[in-house]
Image (cartoon, rainbow, N blue to C red):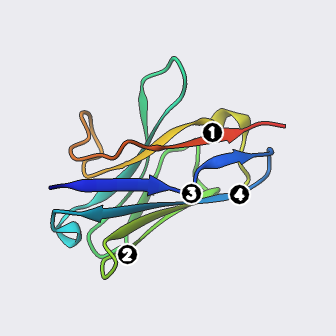
């Protein structure tokens, strides 16, 4: 059974930071490029960041470039997203996915990130 489980979300003040994790099982994680996608209330999904198989190439949406860092550990079958300098507009449900385009392939249920003072 394919499983992707995100964690690490929460409520932080603007300027704060969070580190999201996505633990996976049931598929060959090392054979998939991975992405983080977010969906804000009342809006459609937005691709945030992607990473290649080896983790040496990373990609970011303009809205998060310079603030977020994606990484992966193929030994642990886990994807990460370090989010710094968080802004209220980063508030969303964040989930990991095996495809950077809709419908995003395998995906988890997500972890909520709320940025508010």
Give the number of the mark in front: 2 or 4.
Answer: 4
Alpha carbon separation for disc pair 2 and 3: 23 Å
Q: Position of residue 42 (x, y in %)?
A: 51, 17
Determine whether 80 is above or below 45 in the image: below
Give the number of the mark in front: 4 or 3.
Answer: 3
Question: In terms of secondary structure, where does tag 3 sit?
Answer: loop
Residue 22 visible from this viewpoint: yes
Q: Which residue is mark 4?
A: 17
Question: In terms of secondary structure, where does tag 4 sit?
Answer: loop
Instruction: Answer few, some or many: residues within 10 Å of disc 4's Cα (few below 14, many 20 plus, some between 14 and 19).
Output: some
Q: Which residue is mark 2?
A: 56
* Viewer-side residue, 5 vs 74: 5
Q: Which mark is residue 8?
A: 3
Residue 83 visible from this viewpoint: no
Asked if marks 4 and 3 touch (Cβ < 8 Å), the reply is: no
- Residue at (41, 63) in percent of width and height: 58
Determine whether 4 is above or below 101 in the image: below
- Residue at (22, 72) in percent of width and height: 30
- Residue at (67, 39) in percent of width and height: 114
Alpha carbon separation for disc pair 4 and 3: 11 Å
Alpha carbon separation for disc pair 2 and 1: 25 Å
Q: Which residue is mark 1?
A: 90
Pick whichever of labels 4 and 3 is earlier in the sequence. Answer: 3
């Amino acid at each position: 059974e394919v499983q992707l489980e995100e964690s690490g979300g929460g409520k932080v003040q603007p300027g704060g930071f969070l580190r999201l994790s996505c633990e996976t099982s049931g598929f060959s994680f090392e054979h998939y490029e991975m992405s983080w996608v977010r969906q804000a209330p009342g809006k459609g999904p937005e691709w945030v960041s992607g990473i290649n198989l080896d983790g040496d190439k990373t990609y970011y949406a303009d809205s998060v470039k310079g603030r977020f860092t994606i990484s992966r550990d193929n030994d642990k079958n886990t994807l990460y997203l370090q989010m710094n300098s968080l802004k209220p507009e980063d508030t969303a449900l964040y989930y990991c996915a095996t495809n950077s385009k809709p419908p995003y392939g395998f995906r988890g249920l997500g972890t909520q990130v709320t940025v508010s003072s």
